[in-house]
Image (tube, rainbow, N blue to C red):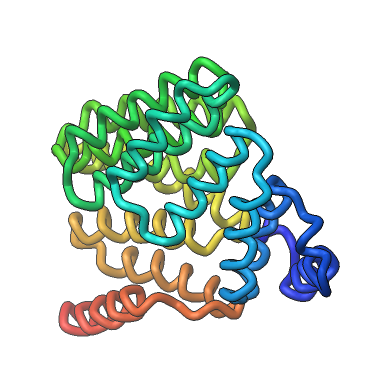
Amino acid sequence: MAEEVSPEKAKEIVEMLTGGGSIDSINTSLALGILPLVESLGDTELLDRLVAHAEMVAEDDIEKGWARFEHLKRYAGSIDDVAELAFHTESLDKGTPLAAAVLHHHALMLLSIEEIDSAQTSIRRSLTLRESIEDKEGIIYGLAVLSRCARLNQDWDSAILHDTRRLELAISMQNDVLHMEALADVAHAQASLGELGTASELYQESLDLAKRLEHPAGHLVASWGIADLAEIETRYDDALLALSDTMHLFIQMGIAAPDLLKQRLHALTSLGEEVK
C-alpha cells in the first residue's frame, strides 16, 4: 500500500487515522494495515505506538498472533520465539495464513545464519499450508525462498524447477512484477549451468518487462545479468551499453544509482579504453 500512494497522501491518511486521540479507536487489523504507510514516513515513534496498540486491542487469538508476529519482526525476536509462534498458530482455527507467514519468516531467519536444511524444512511447511488455501502469491514467495536454498547448495536443477513454477504461477496471475523477477532468476540458474543462450533470452524478457514497468530494481538485475553474459563472451561494449541504460533510468527517475553500478560502469569504461 505504501508504494501506491505519494508521501503527501500517506501523511494525510496517517494523520486522519491517528491524529489526536483517534489512535485509541483503531482496531488491530487497521493498526497493522497502516504500518507500511507510517514506516514510509519514517515516523518510528508512531510505528512503535501502533505495534503496541495492535497487541493491546487484539480481540482473538488470530489478531493476537498477527500482532505478536509484527512485534517479533520489528523488534528482533529470536528464531526460537518465531518457531514457537508458528507452532502455536498452526493449531488455531483459521490460523493457516498466519502460520504460513510465520514459517516463511522463520525460514528467512534460518537462511540468514546459513542453516539451509532447517530453512528448507520451514519453507516447505509454509508452502504446504499456502497450497491448502490456494494462496498463489504466497506460494510464489515461498518458491523463491526454496530456490534460494537450492542456489546456496549449488543445486541449479532444483533452482530452475522452483523458479519455473514461480514463473508459471506469475503468468497465470498476470502479475508482471513477479513474472519479471522469476524470469531473471531462471536466467541466472541457466547461466550457472552454462546455458548462456537460454539465459540471455530470459534476461532480455525480464528487462523488457522492467522497462515497460519502469521498475529500476528489475531493470538493474536483468541488465546486470546481461552484462555478465556479455563479459563472459568478451563483448565489453555490450555490457557497458546494458548497464548504461540502467544508469539512465535511475537518473530519469531521480533515484540515486547504487555504488556497485557506478563502479562497474567505471571499470567497463576503463577496460574498453584499454582494449582499444
Q: Note whether 118 is above or below 210 in the view shown.
A: above
**Residue at figure coordinates x 39%, y 45% from the top left:** 184
Q: x and y percent of residue 261 in the render?
A: 35, 74
Number of numbered markers: 0
Pick the front one: 70 or 153: 70
Q: x and y percent of residue 228 in the render?
A: 26, 58
**Residue at figure coordinates x 76%, y 67% from the top left:** 14
Q: Which image quarter holds the C terminus?
A: bottom left
Pick the front one: 144 or 134: 134
Quarter where residue 210 is shown: bottom right
**Residue at figure coordinates x 50%, y 44% from the top left:** 180
Q: Note whether 126 is above or below 247 in the view shown.
A: above
Q: Note whether 121 is above or below 45 in the view shown.
A: above
Report if residue 186 is visible in the image: no
**Residue at figure coordinates x 72%, y 73% from the top left:** 7
Report if residue 17 is visible in the image: yes
Q: Which image quarter holds the N terminus?
A: bottom right
Left/right of residue 39 with respect to residue 227 in the rendered view: right
Q: x and y percent of residue 78 in the render?
A: 30, 51
Left/right of residue 64 with respect to residue 29 in the rendered view: left
Left/right of residue 13 with respect to residue 176 in the rendered view: right
Pick the front one: 268 or 249: 249
Pick the front one: 39 or 153: 39
Q: x and y percent of residue 157 in the render?
A: 22, 27
